[in-house]
């Protein structure tokens, strides 16, 4: 793992203490490696001297809650090793199933770890059910809750956990992580992925997997010089493709948003206001995209128009 030395120091210091807290919130933007940290930390937690430990995914004392496949067809795809769609939330039934397992003792040692990836996706009723376990945790059970937006989590949950904050990595660390995970990337895609990462290796890798280097180059041209003849906005449709899936659309919107963020240091106060307006509308669009069935061409036109409106041109000023 790259980075997050402070998080490791906090975790290992607690493990070395006499009374380790039972609830941990791993907080920070998506893609920083919080889930990977949780898995590695859980493996350290449950390890016993002299006892052979199975892999995390097969460990009887590491329980993980995450969204299930969306339907039976997606279950089949998962079982066949194919890409598959997930449900949008973690249900109360999943939490209750977990709690039934917590009535037994750990299998291989004295400790058990529960990973929830991510707590942002818990249904309201699932959060309330989980709260009971956080209030009265079974002996030897420790919870690691991955959370991308800490403010969305109920104060009653936050108050029962220690919060470990994960901060964006440096550009150099993101580059190292990206090169290790995807050494085959071409130069244009690698440059674009690093440009939109915002310190998140996961965001860089997700962008690179979508092959949106050309789209990112267009985003940068739009925000620098506008698009008076609509040529750049028209080119975006070809860059995104005729039938992009939800992940590709989400990656494109996030790339556009990060293009706005990176431009903030290069403009005057009036430009910052235009960028702030474009950013706000892109965030709203990112929330709407998974819910509504947008036409891809019209969506790209909307994103292109938002970026062009922030450019230091007559079009942007209007």
Image (spheres, helix red, strand yellow):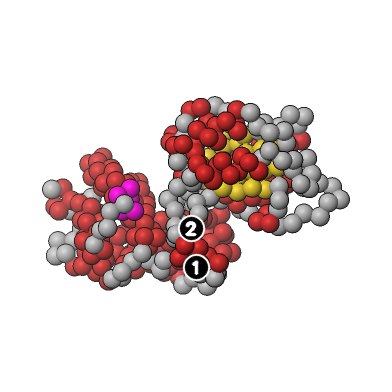
> At which x and y percent is residue 127?
50, 36
Dot 2, crowdedness within 10 Å: few (<14), some or many (≥20)?
Answer: some
Q: Is residue 96 left or right of residue 214?
A: right
For numbered disc 1, what is the local secondary structure?
Answer: helix
Give the residue displayed 36% in from the left and 57% down from the top: 250
> At which x and y percent is residue 74?
47, 63
Of helix, strand and loop, which mostly describes the magenta segment?
helix
Residue with the mark numbered 1: 77
Residues at circles 1 and 2 in contact by the CB criterion of under 8 Å: yes
For numbered disc 2, what is the local secondary structure?
Answer: loop
Residue 101 is marked as: none
**In the picture, which quadrant includes the N terminus?**
bottom right
Magenta-span inclusion, residue 189: no
Residue 69 is marked as: 2
Q: Is residue 226 above or below residue 281?
A: below
Q: Is residue 130 left or right of residue 87?
A: right
Question: Where does the magenta region start and end?
Answer: 286-290
Q: Is residue 219 left or right of residue 27?
A: left
Give the residue displayed 47% in from the left and 31% down from the top: 154
Mark 1 to mark 2 CA distance (whole Å): 9 Å
> At which x and y percent is residue 147?
51, 42
Q: Is residue 144 left or right of residue 125?
A: right
């Amino acid at each position: 793992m790259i980075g997050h030395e402070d998080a490791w120091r906090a975790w290992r210091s607690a493990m070395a203490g006499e009374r380790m807290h039972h609830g941990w919130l791993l907080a920070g933007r998506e893609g920083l490696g919080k889930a990977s940290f949780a898995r590695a930390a859980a493996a350290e937690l449950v390890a016993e001297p002299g006892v052979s430990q199975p892999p995390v995914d097969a460990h009887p004392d590491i329980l993980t809650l995450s969204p299930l496949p969306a339907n039976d067809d997606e279950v089949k795809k998962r079982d066949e090793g194919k890409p598959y769609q997930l449900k949008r939330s973690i249900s109360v039934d999943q939490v209750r199933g977990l709690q039934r397992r917590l009535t037994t003792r750990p299998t291989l040692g004295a400790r058990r770890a529960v990973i929830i990836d991510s707590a942002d996706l818990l249904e309201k009723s699932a959060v309330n059910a989980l709260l009971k376990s956080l209030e009265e945790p079974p002996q030897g059970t420790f919870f690691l809750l991955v959370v991308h937006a800490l403010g969305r989590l109920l104060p009653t949950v936050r108050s029962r956990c220690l919060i470990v904050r994960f901060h964006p990595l440096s550009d150099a660390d993101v580059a190292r992580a990206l090169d290790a995970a995807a050494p085959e990337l071409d130069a244009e895609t690698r440059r674009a992925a690093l440009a939109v990462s915002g310190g998140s290796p996961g965001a860089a890798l997700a962008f690179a997997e979508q092959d949106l280097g050309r789209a990112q180059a267009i985003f940068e041209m739009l925000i620098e010089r506008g698009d008076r003849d609509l040529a750049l906005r028209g080119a975006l449709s070809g860059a995104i493709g005729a039938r992009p899936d939800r992940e590709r659309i989400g990656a494109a919107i996030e790339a556009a948003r990060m293009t706005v963020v990176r431009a903030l240091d290069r403009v005057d106060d009036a430009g910052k206001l235009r960028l702030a307006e474009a950013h706000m509308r892109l965030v709203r669009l990112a929330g709407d995209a998974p819910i509504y069935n947008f036409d891809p061409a019209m969506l790209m036109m909307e994103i292109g128009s938002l970026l062009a409106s922030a450019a230091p041109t007559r079009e942007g000023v209007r």
